[in-house]
Image (spheres, rainbow, N blue to C red):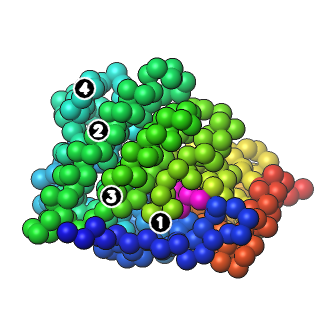
């Protein structure tokens, strides 16, 4: 059978760095890269209705298999018409396999060669994930891109503990792709793609060997996993710089769970195409705002009577209508609308950053754009006197 269920093409390369712009074609539309995927863990991007998400215009969104498996569950999802119908979103969707949640719920799980058993954080019920069942679940949801089951290690971790974990993840990857091929056979139960995951903590040699193994398997794309788990930013940047070129150039590269704007811009320069992170939505719920002039915390008293928008250079609905002072007033009064307004702004900032990065790359001025973006963010927002 043909493996071109997803197709990816690099349409522009930076002359000085590995940065590139690409096009990923999926069953639910074109994804222009580099792209940031808003996170809708339980099937909804927190604080954003489907029609508002469409206005924001992400190329692709992310949901989480672990959480959706617990509720509404596979049968519940089927009765609700699949994940796209549940989300009220007709564009491309990528689902994480649940490997990170298994890592974060280490006290509730038992890992073995065939998979992982865990107790639900909701009601304590027992569940089982295997490389095959994770693919089956994501396929039943009707997603455009599914991820293999992997083991995400904590930071720090002894090198002796890394290799056995990576070896197991690679064996799981082989099983996952066999099951995916069965689901995408003549019966056409699923038309999505499957990404393999490179693991290896901060060890370049282990990641190199893992990548060689993964490249021998016909995945539709490849991810860098196991980073942004507590390591210093310098170590994160170094790991991304040596990890990205190890993955096939002709396939999309996805850096999982990263991150801050500067981390994303660094990774784009290393040749990474796709990103996801909860920061834009989670930070909004704590009052943290990302802007082209640096980050601000709306709770701070300096914004109490500030008539300026969150970001004078931003054209999002929040910045067009509301001042910093108004948003602080709403937030301190625990008005739920304040979180929605901050969420819309944060997502707009991240998505606009990626669109501008792509435009700069296509115009041959990627390095100039990156330097200007980072320098301007270092200045930081200022309260009006």
Residue of label 1: 250
Image position of 31 with respect to 48: above or below: below
Residue 337 image position (x, y, % from top left): 52, 58
Q: Distance between the residues labelled 2 and 3?
A: 14 Å
Residue 277 image position (x, y, % from top left): 51, 50
Residue 354, disc? none
- Regarding residue 219, the answer to whether it shows in the image is yes
| Closest to the observer, 330 or 357 | 357
Give the residues drawn in magenta, as a range. 271-275
Residue of label 3: 218
Examine the residues drawn in magenta and state their main secondary structure: loop
| 274 part of magenta stretch | yes
Q: Do the residues labelled 3 and 4 touch (CB within 8 Å)?
A: no
Residue of label 4: 112
Q: Do the residues labelled 3 and 1 touch (CB within 8 Å)?
A: no
Camera-near label (3 vs 4) is 3
Q: Distance between the residues labelled 1 and 4?
A: 34 Å
Q: Is label 3 in a helix, a strand or a loop?
A: loop
| Closest to the observer, 166 or 27 | 166
- Residue at left offset 47%, top offset 65%: 250
Quarter-wise, where is residue 117 in the image? top left
- Residue at left offset 60%, top offset 45%: 242
Mark 2: give few (<14), some (14-19) or many (20+) Cα within 10 Å: some
Q: Distance between the residues labelled 2 and 1?
A: 23 Å
Q: Is label 1 in a helix, a strand or a loop?
A: loop
- Residue at left offset 49%, top offset 53%: 247
Which of the two labelled residues, at mark 2 and mark 1, occupies the earlier sequence position?
A: 2
């Amino acid at each position: 059978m043909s493996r071109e269920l997803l197709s990816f093409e690099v349409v522009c390369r930076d002359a000085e760095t590995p940065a590139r712009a690409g096009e990923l074609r999926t069953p639910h539309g074109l994804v222009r890269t580099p792209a940031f995927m808003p996170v809708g863990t339980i099937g909804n991007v927190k604080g954003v209705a489907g029609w508002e998400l469409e206005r924001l215009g992400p190329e692709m969104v992310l949901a989480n298999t672990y959480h959706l498996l617990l509720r509404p569950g596979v049968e519940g999802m089927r009765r609700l018409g699949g994940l796209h119908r549940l989300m009220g979103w007709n564009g491309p969707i990528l689902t994480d396999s649940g490997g990170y949640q298994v890592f974060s719920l280490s006290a509730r799980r038992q890992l073995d060669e065939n998979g992982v058993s865990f107790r639900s954080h909701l009601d304590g019920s027992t569940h089982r994930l295997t490389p095959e069942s994770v693919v089956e679940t994501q396929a039943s949801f009707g997603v455009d891109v599914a991820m293999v089951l992997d083991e995400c290690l904590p930071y720090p971790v002894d090198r002796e503990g890394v290799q056995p974990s990576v070896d197991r993840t690679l064996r799981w990857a082989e099983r996952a792709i066999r099951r995916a091929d069965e689901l995408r056979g003549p019966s056409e139960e699923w038309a999505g793609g499957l990404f393999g995951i490179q693991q290896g903590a901060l060890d370049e040699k282990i990641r190199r060997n893992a990548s060689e193994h993964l490249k021998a398997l016909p995945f539709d794309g490849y991810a860098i996993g196991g980073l942004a788990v507590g390591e210093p930013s310098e170590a994160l940047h170094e790991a991304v710089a040596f990890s990205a070129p190890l993955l096939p150039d002709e396939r999309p590269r996805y850096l999982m769970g990263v991150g801050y704007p500067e981390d994303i811009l660094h990774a784009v320069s290393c040749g990474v195409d796709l990103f996801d992170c909860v920061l834009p939505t989670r930070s909004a719920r704590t009052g943290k705002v990302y802007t082209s002039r640096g980050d601000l915390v709306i709770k701070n008293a300096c914004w109490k009577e500030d008539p300026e928008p969150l970001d004078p250079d931003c054209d999002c609905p929040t910045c067009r209508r509301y001042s910093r002072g108004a948003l602080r007033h709403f937030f301190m009064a625990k008005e739920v609308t304040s979180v929605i307004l901050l969420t819309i702004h944060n997502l707009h900032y991240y998505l606009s950053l990626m669109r501008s990065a792509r435009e700069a790359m296509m115009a041959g001025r990627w390095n100039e754009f990156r330097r200007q973006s980072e320098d301007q963010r270092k200045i930081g927002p200022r309260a009006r006197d």
